[in-house]
Amino acid sequence: MMEFRQNTIRGLWALTGREIKKWLKDPLILLVTIVQPLIWMALLGKSMNIGALLSNLPPEIRDQMMRSAFGTSDYFSYMAVGMISFTVIFTAMFTGMSVVWDRRLGFLDKVLSTPVPRSAIIFAKVLNSTIRSIFQATLILLAALALGLKLGPTFTPLNIFGIYAVIFLFSTGLSFLFLSFTLRSTKIETPMAVVNLINLPLVFTSNIFFPNSLMPSWLQTVAKINPVSYLTDAIRQLTIFEMDTGALLLDLTYLGILAVLLSAVGIFLARRYLSR
């Protein structure tokens, strides 16, 4: 039992370090991942000046209407926080592709011939995904502040750790989900097809761009079960909203349960189907 734990820890440490080194050696991927949400923030976030549609109203009434709809008087702030979720989604989705490349290059066969447990192999990729997501989210938040993000009255520097926690939970669950689709795949087209099928529905059936209350009733039902909505709401509670503790606890509970369930499924499938 002790030897198994040592193999797990050593294998997880070594494989996670390898994944991070691969990421750092290809700065173009990091640059593209950061530039894309910045373009959305700078172009879409600033051009969709929804407050200007109410410019004929007195400022007090305009701010009240914006807060009633978006929870903040500034739509850019609302949308900029959504870009953090946008980045986390895409980082988690592409985690599964590394399994395909490792298999095709022969690295996966070498790892499977070692005493490292299969669960450690897959969890190393999930951990790499969460580290990347947290790092990218930090850069996006700093860029949003430079572009005019308005923080809420209950924001404190300690809230940053809460943001990292919800990103960790969401990224862990979603990464395990997409890795499960590629455990036995030898073609890069398989994860690409899954990503192309799921990414836009996840984004546009969530509250990244608009609150659930402004959606059609049938779409509101979908948004209520979409984990992206809970991730985005939790980050907004911690940054731009006046924090609702009950809503934040609901978000954390939902994301926590999702992470545990999808992690269990991913580890089970890795032990059963991850083979040479």
Image (tube, rainbow, N blue to C red):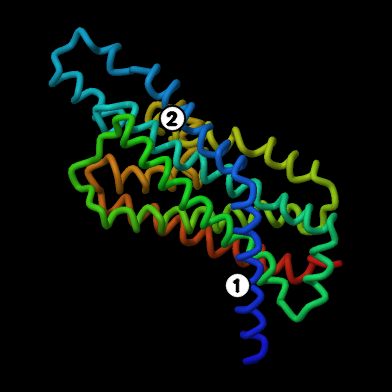
Mark 2 residue element: loop
Q: In the image, residue 137 lies at what x, y percent?
A: 44, 46
Residue at the location (50% across, 53% down)?
A: 170
Left or right of 29 in this view: 66 = left
Q: How many marks?
A: 2
Taking 265 as reference, is 238 above or below it? above
Residue at the location (48% across, 46% down)?
A: 136
Residue furthest top as drawn: 56
State whether residue 241 appears in this view.
yes
Q: Quadrant of the C terminus?
A: bottom right
Mark 1 residue element: helix
Taking 99 as reference, is 122 above or below it? below
Crowd rating for badge 2 (residues with CA inside 10 Å; few <14, some 14–19, many 20+) = many
Residue 144 lies in what quarter of the image? top left
**Mark 1 to mark 2 CA distance (whole Å):** 38 Å
Left or right of 238 in this view: 169 = right
User: Would you name the residue on which mark 1 appears?
Assistant: 13
Residue at the location (61% across, 42% down)?
A: 29
Q: Which mark is residue 209?
A: 2
